[in-house]
Image (cartoon, helix red, strand yellow):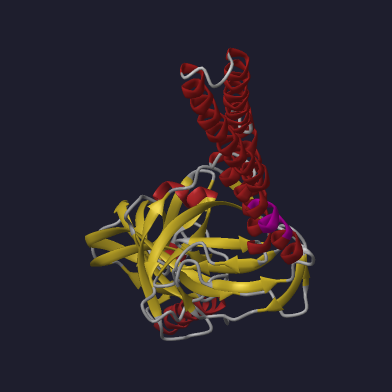
Amino acid sequence: MRKRWLLLLIAVVALILYFILRRPSAPTVSFARTHRETLVSTLPTNGKVEPLEWQAVRVATPGVVVKVPVHEGQDVRRGVVLAQLSAPGMADTLHAAEARQAEAQSQLQGLQAGGRTSDLTDIASSLDRARVTHDEAVREYNSLKRLLDKQAATAIEVEIAAQKVRAAELQIQSLQARRKSLVGSTDLSAADARLREAAANVQQAREHLGEGRIVSPVAGSIYSLPARVGMYLNAGDLVANVGTLDRLRVRVYVDEPELGRVQVSQPVRITWDALPGHEWQGTVERKPTEVMPLGTRQVGEVQCSIENPERLLVPGTNINAEIRTSVAEHALTIPKTAIRRDAAGFWVFLLKDGRVQRRNVRPGPSNVTRASILDGLKDGDAVALPNDQPLKDGDRVTPVFP
């Protein structure tokens, strides 16, 4: 009897072991524990560099580039010649305009002096002769008048001499009136108008000739110089871009869902793949006013300014940007990849008594790798990291902590 019970006990134990061994083992899942830290929340994205202050220098009148006395990267002052264009025929036009101006000036000066020199000389000579004739007639008249008093001349002779005096006086008056009539107020006005017109033509010719000299409108660095000797440039073609490179603007492209995190004055860190190990610091200066497509993305242009004292960054560069959107002190954090999302919201798989348990959470600020949790977890909780095996609420697991 005792032997029978012993055999029965052995059979039951063997059956229990059989079912235990047949049951599938719990999958191995990696977990991470929550811990407290200062979390700097950043928004990583990309952008493009341009000068903070710059000016595009373009051609006003077409021509062939005959001289480029500057080079790309050169610092220039305002007014420095960037390129010289040919201006066929404009030099001759200027010389002709200057000659017409000199002629108009001479005519005006002559009128202001009383008339043309030849006319004035002729009248002056006639006046001299008329005065001589007048003086002779006066002497003759006086002599005959004395003779008349002595009964040595007749009254008719005296009257004839007096008529000669009056004739000489009339000739003098006529010549003087003629001299005054040489220049009238309308003549002076017309001459002055001709001079002003000639001066305007000279100025216009000089401006057209000067348009062949392309000068820098601002002081700065030449960061683009497409003009080359021998090129023909049409009106509006670009000669150079001049701007300040010590301080740059960065247009950072932020995806539409993240725009709410961006605020003016937030710090920005810039890196460039072409110069690993270098970084530039700046701040957000302006939020976007519209959302626009960029490839497959919908983005807003966030304008930032950065310092570039060594001028290592150049306009047109494609850069990486990190906007520091917030800093959370003593935040409860988990790896960002542990957070899952569905129609019900954000949640994690929490380790509880060897099983995973779905737990709703409320995420806070995050950075590239970690996220803060504002509600749903406590210090020391373990949350499941992504794995190849699908999990569901209540699954038994074998936890490992990398």
Outermost left residue: 330
Residue 328 % position (x, y): 25, 59
Q: Tag count in the figure?
A: 0
Q: Quadrant of the C terminus?
A: bottom left
Q: Nearer the viewer, residue 298 or 328?
A: 298
Q: Nearer the viewer, residue 12 or 23?
A: 23
Q: Mark yes or no: residue 380 visible.
A: no
Q: Nearer the viewer, residue 224 or 31?
A: 224
Q: Quadrant of the N terminus?
A: bottom left
Q: Nearer the viewer, residue 272 or 73?
A: 73
Residue 107 % position (x, y): 64, 46
Q: Is residue 162 one of those drawn in magenta?
A: no
Q: Is residue 193 left or right of residue 43?
A: right
145, above or below 28, in the image: above
Q: Mark yes or no: residue 363 visible.
A: yes
Residue 316 % position (x, y): 57, 70
Residue 329 % position (x, y): 21, 61
The magenta region covers 96-101
Q: Tell me the quarter of the picture where residue 129 sits.
A: top right
Q: Is residue 364 left or right of residue 252?
A: left
211, above or below 74, in the image: above
Outermost front residue: 151
Which residue is rendered at x = 26% and y = 61% of the image?
A: 332
Which residue is rendered at x = 77% and y = 62% of the image?
A: 234
Which residue is rendered at x = 60% and y = 35% of the image?
A: 133
Secondary structure character of the magenta stretch overall: helix
Which residue is rendered at x = 57% and y = 30% of the image?
A: 137
Outermost top residue: 155
123, above or below 97, in the image: above
